[in-house]
Amino acid sequence: MLKLIIAISVIFVSSTSFAKGYNVFSIGIYDVEFDRDLQGNYITSDFRYEVRFDKSLLDIGPEEDNFFYLKPLFGLELTGKKATYIYSGVYLEDNLGKLVSGKNSKWIFTPSFATGYYDDGDGKKLGNKLEFRTTLEISYQKENDDRIGISFGHISNANIGNKNPGVEIISLSYQKPF
């Protein structure tokens, strides 16, 4: 499985090596649960580095609406309890103002989906080495094109493992264009 993830990442990197995009540096809270107390769970810190390429892999919508352009990403996520997640996937990106009111704003909406290799370390046992991540992010684009964002993500194995407890992550990010 790890070889498959590395191969997919190499394909993404080689096909988008001359593309523009963002380096995403993120810190957050891993295993946020709103429906139970803080005793006995796996809440810890979460650190994520992600590369998002601005080159579309697949155009599935009308030309005038860039929201439907699937773009590649890959990343590495580490927790304070030594869990590691190496992943690659796709994201969509749209100007939130244009999406809501038809006028551009400095707010960007970025949903994403990824799959990858998960090692639970001393952290929460997610039930499988193959895990999926979905994330919703809203970021503010500064004058120099840097972005500051907040995201909510979920990692789980989509019930292909023996158990599927899943984990939620809330993160703050700083995004630097390349």
Image (cartoon, rainbow, N blue to C red):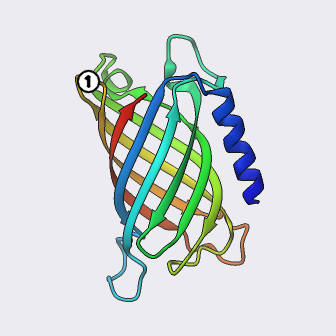
Where disc 1 sits, the SS reads loop
Specify the farthest residue to the left: 143
In-front residue for pair 85/37? 85
- The residue labelled by disc 1 is 144
Q: Would you say 144 lies left or right of 4 here?
A: left
Amino acid found under the numbered disc labelled 1: Asn
Quadrant in the picture for residue 37? bottom left
- Find residue 58 and report its horizontal and vertical position in percent: 66, 25
Quarter of the image where the N terminus is located: bottom right
Neighbourhood count class around disc 1 (C-alpha, 10 Å): few under 14, some 14–19, many 20 upward: few
Quarter of the image where the C terminus is located: top left
In-front residue for pair 125/63? 125
Quadrant in the picture for residue 108? top left
Q: Would you say 119 lies left or right of 92 here?
A: right
The residue at 73%/59% (across/down) is: 2
The residue at 72%/78% (across/down) is: 162
Q: Would you say 87 lies left or right of 51 here?
A: right
- Find residue 7 and report its horizontal and vertical position in percent: 75, 45
Disc tally is 1
In-front residue for pair 153/35? 153
The residue at 59%/73% (across/down) is: 126
Above or below 40: residue 2: above
- Find residue 141 and report its horizontal and vertical position in percent: 28, 29
Above or below 160: residue 163: below
Specify the farthest residue to the bottom: 40
- Find residue 138 and report its horizontal and vertical position in percent: 34, 40
Specify the farthest residue to the top: 64
Above or below 134: residue 95: above
